Image (tube, rainbow, N blue to C red):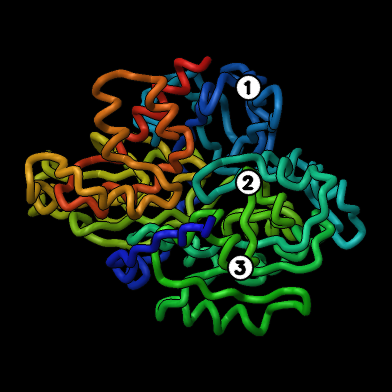
Amino acid sequence: MKKRPMPEVHIEGFKEMSINGKTLEYLSPKSVFLPTNFPSELSVLVKPGVRVLMGQKIMIKEGRFGYPILSPISGTVKETIRKWHPSNKMIPMIEIENDFKEELVDTFKNLNPEKMTKDDLVNVMKDSGLLGMGGAGFPTYAKYETDKPVDQVIINLAECEPFITCDYTYVLNYPNELIFGLKYMIKASNAKSGVIALKNKEINNKLIDILMPLLENNMSLFLLNDVYPAGWERYVIEKVTGKSYGVLPIEAGVIVNNATTAITFGRLLKEGLVPSCKYMTVTGDAMSECGNVLMKFGTSVHELLDLFNNVKEDVDKEKTLMICGGPMTGNAMFSGDFVTTPTLGSVIALRQEQYIGRRYPHCLGCGTCAKHCPVNLSPYQIRRTLRSGDVDELIALGITKCIQCGQCSYVCPSHVELTSDMLIARDLVRKMKR
């Protein structure tokens, strides 16, 4: 049976808004707030009133693929309070009040990666709590704890979402750290080579010019088509290697890491800087100013919005659409009263009135969503089945394969919010299967 080509859609981009805007650093927030139960219940190691150092373990995720959560600042642990999280849930969080001393633990000082073995490097990933920062938040070390042969480490710099430029900005400002991180990811996997995959579009020409002279002999660049969902891990692997796989990328002899993750690993090995910060894009037509800011995990988004003079004065804040993450895969928020996480790439403020209104009142059953689904689902059928509550039928329709890319909502001629229904259906099935 001939394999169906992976569907591709060109999405109008708005990246220039932030690329041409400010590039700031905000590494001294008043406090940081760290979830105690997301993505699952965490074991808390510190009590209120205790002073912690930057990089000190304050929580641990137990069990399979467990990892520590380190403090991104030095300061005093306060009482646990409830705060809004980018998942659109209000959850308990530890507050650490900043003492502005940036006193760092000794754990990762004076590392010598040249003398480290594969196991040594993987242990550094594990002990530092390094997570994938492209969105999934999967512990990085788990990809490298494999006895299967690895041909390539691929750095995903596709940055698919139409507004986001945080990875672009980090690479622009820390290109040597990207290459350094990739070099030791190759060593940590015993891979033969490394590839940096980015879109073939004009705004990336500057990155290409910077990166090309820095590449080592076993490294290369790969230019992807300027389409969506070119940042999807499976899409990147198939385009770079020509191989497909069943469940895990390692089946194709590949490990994929986000560009920000690679830079963070590079800075950890080079500077002893624990995973504590990343660039985040602040953009949208409702913002007074746009750009990118290097910020600490757990920072209040309100503080970051103020750096860009917040929402324009002529915009009704009650009618501002605040999106946490990208418009394709992110969540709409009530306000900027939530905190950043290692996986949050952007906050987008849009004039809501421009995005209200539908061409047709209901789903037409035209099948456009099914035609464009990268994992061959029929979102309109899943939406109808969700309304009937038939969990067995949702499973039969393959809802658990949904990658929540947002493409079904984007291509729908009626502007039906299919992605939200897909997520609800997927969560319903997962709850019923427990």
Report helix, strand or loop for mark 2: loop
Residue 182's spot in the image, x, y percent? 71, 63
Residue ID for mark 1? 50
Hey, what amino acid is under mark 2? Gly
Q: Which mark is residue 256?
A: none
Residue 273 horizontal/vertical position (percent): 68, 51
Neighbourhood count class around disc 1 (C-alpha, 10 Å): few under 14, some 14–19, many 20 upward = few
**In this orientation, which residue lies closer to the viewer: 407 or 29?**
407
Label 3: which secondary element: helix
Question: In the drawing, does residue 310 fall left or right of residue 347?
Answer: left
Q: Which residue is mark 2?
A: 246
How would you rate the neighbour count of disc 3 (Cα within 10 Å): few for under 14, some for 14-19, many for 20 or more? some
Can residue 407 be seen from the camera position used here?
yes
Q: Does label 1 or label 3 sit earlier along the sequence? A: 1
Left or right of 208? Residue 432 is left
For image coordinates 25% across by 20% down, the residue present is: 388
Q: Is residue 181 visible?
A: no
- Location of mark 3 (residue): 240
Labels in figure, total: 3
Amino acid bearing label 1: Val
Q: Give the CA distance from mark 1 to mark 3.
A: 49 Å
Quarter of the rendering occupied by the N terminus:
bottom right
- Residue 299 or 104: which is nearer the viewer? 299
Q: Residue at x 43, y 54 (%)?
A: 280
Q: Is residue 427 above or below residue 143?
A: above
Residues at circles 1 and 3 in contact by the CB criterion of under 8 Å: no
User: Considering the numbered disc 1 on the image, is that residue within a helix, a strand or a loop?
Assistant: loop
- Side (left or right) of 175 relative to 363: right
User: Toward which corner of the image does residue 382 lie, by quadrant?
Assistant: top left
